[in-house]
Amino acid sequence: RLRSGDGLVLFDGTGGEYTATLVNLQRRRAQARIDAHTPREAEAPVAVTVLQGISKGERMDYAMQKATELGVARIIPVISERCVVRLDSERWAKKQRHWQAVAIAACEQCGRNRIPSIDSPCSLEAGLAEVDSLPGVIFDTEGDRAARDLQPTEQLATLIGPEGGLAPEEIQRVADLGWQRIRLGPRILRSDTAPVAALAVIQTVIGDLG
């Protein structure tokens, strides 16, 4: 839809953005002239890492897309007890590249100029080891604290289950690590709805949606 001479905004994923002018447009190639750099930031004040239980197809894509729009800093896809998706290492690598592309496209749509990291899929144990230095929170119907009890922090980790949910032992495991168990209403949310709800709560209480 753009033509030579039109203006556009570019970003390289590391912060800030560039006003530019399209100077050459071909079928599979385009050239632009960088005119100026603008140090605009659109990141949330709390860097949230989501350990996302892997779900099938579009549900996982939706979770990646909406988490990016809501300001997630990092997503670690985890293979938990009730995951139904089982692939070999080559296909997992392909999935990781696809999810990263989904996150990049979501950044373009929502105006973020820093791209969240999408890790390679790993076991829940390995994912928890990646965030062992961060305060954690898990949302579940039997949580003993309300969302308003979330304390301001610069970094936070949360765990979301796959289609079959988290096993009781997995919930207890993160509780034993000292993670807060926050009530998110009496209803059980789908695997693609849960990260959206969790991030919206976090960003409203201690982020930039309040």
Image: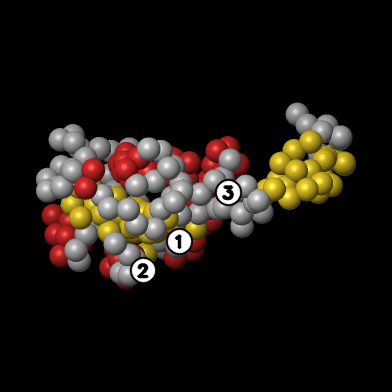
Q: Which mark is residue 119?
A: 1
State the CA–CA distance, disc 3 to disc 1.
Answer: 23 Å
Across and down, in percent, residue 117 comes to 49, 58
Q: Residue at x 21, y 47 (%)?
A: 149
Q: Earlier in the sequence, mark 1 or mark 2?
A: 1
Mark 3 or mark 2, which is nearer to you? 3
* 88 vs 140, nearest the viewer: 140
Across and down, in percent, residue 16 comes to 64, 51
Mark yes or no: residue 85 visible: no
Residue under circle 3?
A: 41
Q: Amino acid at mark 2?
A: Glu
Residue under circle 2?
A: 130
Mark 1 or mark 2, which is nearer to you? 2
Q: Residue at x 79, y 36 (%)?
A: 7
Compared to residue 43, the image places residue 81 above or below, namely below
Name the image colouring: secondary structure
Q: Earlier in the sequence, mark 3 or mark 2?
A: 3
Describe the element under mark 1 as helix, strand or loop. Answer: loop
State the CA–CA distance, disc 1 to disc 2.
Answer: 10 Å
Q: Amino acid at mark 1?
A: Asp
Mark 1 in CB contact with mark 2 (< 8 angstroms): yes
State the CA–CA distance, disc 3 to disc 2.
Answer: 26 Å
Describe the element under mark 3 as helix, strand or loop. Answer: loop
Across and down, in percent, residue 210 comes to 37, 38
The quarter of the picture where the N terminus appears is top right
Q: Residue at x 20, y 55 (%)?
A: 180
Q: Amino acid at mark 3?
A: Glu
Mark 3 or mark 1, which is nearer to you? 3
* 78 vs 196, nearest the viewer: 196
